[in-house]
Image (spheres, helix red, strand yellow):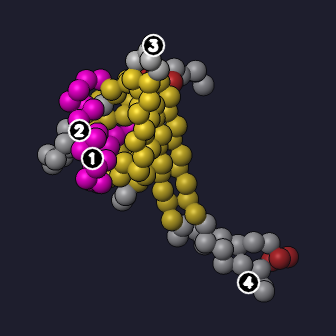
Amino acid sequence: MSVMAGRDILLKLGDAASPPVFTSMAGLRMKSIALNARTIDVTHADSPDGWRELLGGAGLKSCSLTGAGLFANRDADRKVREIFFNQTIAPWQVILPGFGCLEGPFVLAALDYSGRHDGEASWSMSLASAGALTFAAL
């Protein structure tokens, strides 16, 4: 397996078209993606040797993304603010080079701004999946 640069992970926002057209929103310096599947325990008195049993394919799946960096431009900043304040569920796309592309509806769960007096303004955000996601291997 070859090493991938973290900067190559892309986070894009889709428009209202069908299918959506995706545009990069920001220069992300830090990113994290968590895929989760809550399990359903179906263990009972007759489970073999008392081992836990899980119900396959029935768990609650979710995805969360966090990112921090610099907005690409004022228009990107404006779009992300609108999505946050309206709590709009929007199509997002995450491209993980050498792995795949996650795409689907997300809600912008947190948006933070920060900056030092002698540096640039930066931001961080958290996205939470709000529906079915698709995955395409690259």
Quadrant where the N terminus sits is top right
Residue placed under numbered mark 4 in the picture: 44
x%, y% of residue 58? 52, 70
How far, Cα to Cα, is label 1 from label 4? 45 Å
How far, Cα to Cα, is label 1 from label 3? 29 Å
Residue placed under numbered mark 1 in the picture: 83
How far, Cα to Cα, is label 3 from label 2? 26 Å
x%, y% of residue 119? 44, 15
Magenta-drawn segment? 72-95
Disc on the earlier residue, 4 or 2? 4
Residue placed under numbered mark 3 in the picture: 118
Residues at marks 4 and 2 touching, judged by CB atoms closer than 8 Å = no
- Horizontally, residue 42 falls left or right of residue 23, namely right
Quadrant where the C terminus sits is top left
Q: Residue furthest left?
A: 17
User: For the point 35% across and 52% down, which residue is it?
Assistant: 107
How far, Cα to Cα, is label 4 from label 2? 50 Å
Q: Helix, strand, or loop for circle 3?
A: loop
Q: Nearer the observer, disc 4 or disc 2?
A: 2
Disc on the earlier residue, 1 or 4? 4
Q: Nearer the viewer, residue 99 or 117?
A: 117
Q: Nearer the observer, disc 3 or disc 4?
A: 3
- Horizontally, residue 21 falls left or right of residue 36, namely left
How far, Cα to Cα, is label 3 from label 4? 62 Å
Residue 13 visible here: yes
